[in-house]
């Protein structure tokens, strides 16, 4: 062991890891919308598909290496088809609940292969920031606090995991990469559960497979400053949706603690309390009753968040971090000189964010949307599906799932919009919503597809690809 692990940090790290273990156990116990009866699966078939998922993940990574996004996403859908071959069986020994768990972890395995094999897309600036954070964690190992504001203007909260790894393996950014890759793959597993709460099983599998092969998610699930946000964000959204819809006290507590964990990080997470309120309001509009119980559940979320933030609030630098963030000193709409100036800035912000998902080769200034990546967020076809899925979500505003997806998309872009410059680093919160909306578009297209022999064949293939969680 390179350094002695302080007892206080050991206890805090054990509690943090234990919370994640409990979160994943509870995630797979969340009731999903009734979609029918899942086909049982033989255990040997699940083992047989692992090489298929491994090869598919390797091909997706190779496609990303060559910059071929269509092939990467095609391999992602191939991974979903491999899951379908396992899950679409009439005889077997696994129950319907076990099938849902199996599908999530199979997709997570493919995501892990992609993250181990794909090229390093992070710019040098992020690598430098990771090195600084590792140095902060060395200070924590020497007796510092994980709640102290570190060299990057936010608490040393990632040291709850990085610290013990550094104590064992020594001072190296390698441990940060190991943590990021594993957490990135786990975020794909958690996303399957989130997608299952809002989409039909076929589209939940398809959306998760596309997320696993996404270059944007790949970037932010292999660097420390993405993975520390992406994983708890997806967990937070899943428990918040369940708490708002089922009025579950347990989900409310888990959502509140997840939000408290998130608020220890980069300032973009300050948009997530808006998402919390939006989800509860949408649930109330959709149900139109039990508003007192729903308000009480929301209060439990707030209390759990405050209790998680209590150690940070007890420090002066922690209170300054929460109440006076320093990262955004200039906002897009500050110091306006009149209505004409407001209209001009609004046009530029809207124009820039419409191009956020599509980078123009050689672009500069406001059109260089991907400031922290050398890959566009979406290929052209998925951009069209995103637009269609968002429009459909707005039209069906009286439902629950669709307006939630639309709200998450808008809220995820707020930090980037307020900063004035389209930037995928400040809009990392939007990634889950993007693939939820793409899944929503695929679901609507499947419903609108004309009936006939070809249509039935396509529908059967899509249905088979999502047999994972069908009840």
Image (cartoon, rainbow, N blue to C red):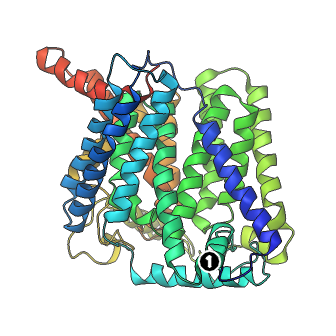
Picture quadrant of residue 452: top left
| Spot occupied by residue 154 in the image (x, y as percentages of width and height) | 67, 74
Q: Residue at x 52, y 45 (%)?
A: 190
The image shows residue 4, relative to residue 375, as above or below, that is below
Q: Is residue 338 visible?
A: no
Q: How many marks?
A: 1
State the image coordinates of residue 212 (x, y, percent, origin top left).
37, 51
Q: Please tell me whether mark 1 sits on a helix, a strand or a loop.
A: helix
* Mark 1 burial class by Cα count in 10 Å: few <14, some 14-19, many 20+: many
Residue wearing tag 1: 166
Tell which of 232 and 359 is nearer to you. Answer: 232
| Residue at 57% across, 35% down | 28
* x and y percentages locating residue 241 in the rendered image: 60, 36
Q: Could you tell me if residue 288 is visible in this image? A: yes
- Give the left or right position of residue 94, taking residue 211 as reference: right
Give coordinates of residue 331: x percent, y percent: 55, 72
* Drawn side of residue 392 relative to residue 64, left or right: right
Which quadrant would the N terminus be assigned to in this image?
bottom right
- Give the residue at x 19% y 25%: 458
Q: Quadrant of residue 264?
A: bottom right
Depth order, front residue of 285/52: 52
Q: In the figure, is residue 414 to the left or right of 207? A: right
Placement of 201 over or under 368, stated as above or below: above
Extreme residue in the right direction: 314
- Residue drawn 45% across the image and 39% down it: 104
> For residue 243, which quarter of the picture?
top right
């Amino acid at each position: 062991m390179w350094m002695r692990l302080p007892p206080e940090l050991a206890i805090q790290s054990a509690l943090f890891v234990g919370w994640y273990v409990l979160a994943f156990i509870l995630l797979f116990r969340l009731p999903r919308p009734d979609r029918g009866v899942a086909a049982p699966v033989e255990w040997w078939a699940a083992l047989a598909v692992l090489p298929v998922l491994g090869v598919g993940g390797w091909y997706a990574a190779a496609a990303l290496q060559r910059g071929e996004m269509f092939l990467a996403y095609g391999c992602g859908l191939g991974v979903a088809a491999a899951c379908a071959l396992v899950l679409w069986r009439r005889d077997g020994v696994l129950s319907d609940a076990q099938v849902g768990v199996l599908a999530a972890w199979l997709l997570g395995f493919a995501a892990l292969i992609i993250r181990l094999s794909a090229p390093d897309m992070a710019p040098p600036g992020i690598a430098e920031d990771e090195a600084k954070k590792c140095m902060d964690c060395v200070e924590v190992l020497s007796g510092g606090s994980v709640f102290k504001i570190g060299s990057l203007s936010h608490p040393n909260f990632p040291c709850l995991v990085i610290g013990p790894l550094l104590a064992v393996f020594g001072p190296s950014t390698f441990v940060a990469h190991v943590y990021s890759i594993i957490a990135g793959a786990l975020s794909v597993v958690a996303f399957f559960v989130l997608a299952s709460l809002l989409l039909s099983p076929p589209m939940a599998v398809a959306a998760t497979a596309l997320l696993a092969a996404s270059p944007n998610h790949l970037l932010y699930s292999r660097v420390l400053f993405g993975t520390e946000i992406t994983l708890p964000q997806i967990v937070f959204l899943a428990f918040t949706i369940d708490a708002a819809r089922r009025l579950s006290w347990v989900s409310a507590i888990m959502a509140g603690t997840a939000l408290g964990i998130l608020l220890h990080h980069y300032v973009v997470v300050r948009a997530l309390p808006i998402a919390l309120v939006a989800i509860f309001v949408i649930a109330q509009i959709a149900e139109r009753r039990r508003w007192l119980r729903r308000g009480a559940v929301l209060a439990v979320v707030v209390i759990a968040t405050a209790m998680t933030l209590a150690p940070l609030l007890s420090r002066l630098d922690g209170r300054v971090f929460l109440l006076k963030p320093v990262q955004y000193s200039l906002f897009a709409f500050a110091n306006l000189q009149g209505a004409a100036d407001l209209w001009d800035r609004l046009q530029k912000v809207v124009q820039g964010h419409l191009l956020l998902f599509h980078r123009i080769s050689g672009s500069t200034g406001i059109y260089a949307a991907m400031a922290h990546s050398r890959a566009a967020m979406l290929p052209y076809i998925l951009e069209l599906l995103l637009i269609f899925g968002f429009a459909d979500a707005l039209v069906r505003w009286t439902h629950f799932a669709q307006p939630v997806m639309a709200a998450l998309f808008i809220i995820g872009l707020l930090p980037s919009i307020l900063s004035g410059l389209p930037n995928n680093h400040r809009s990392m919160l939007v990634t889950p919503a993007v693939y939820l909306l793409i899944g929503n578009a695929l679901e609507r297209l499947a419903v609108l597809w004309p009936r006939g022999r070809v249509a039935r064949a396509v529908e059967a293939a899509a249905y088979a690809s999502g047999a994972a969680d069908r009840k």
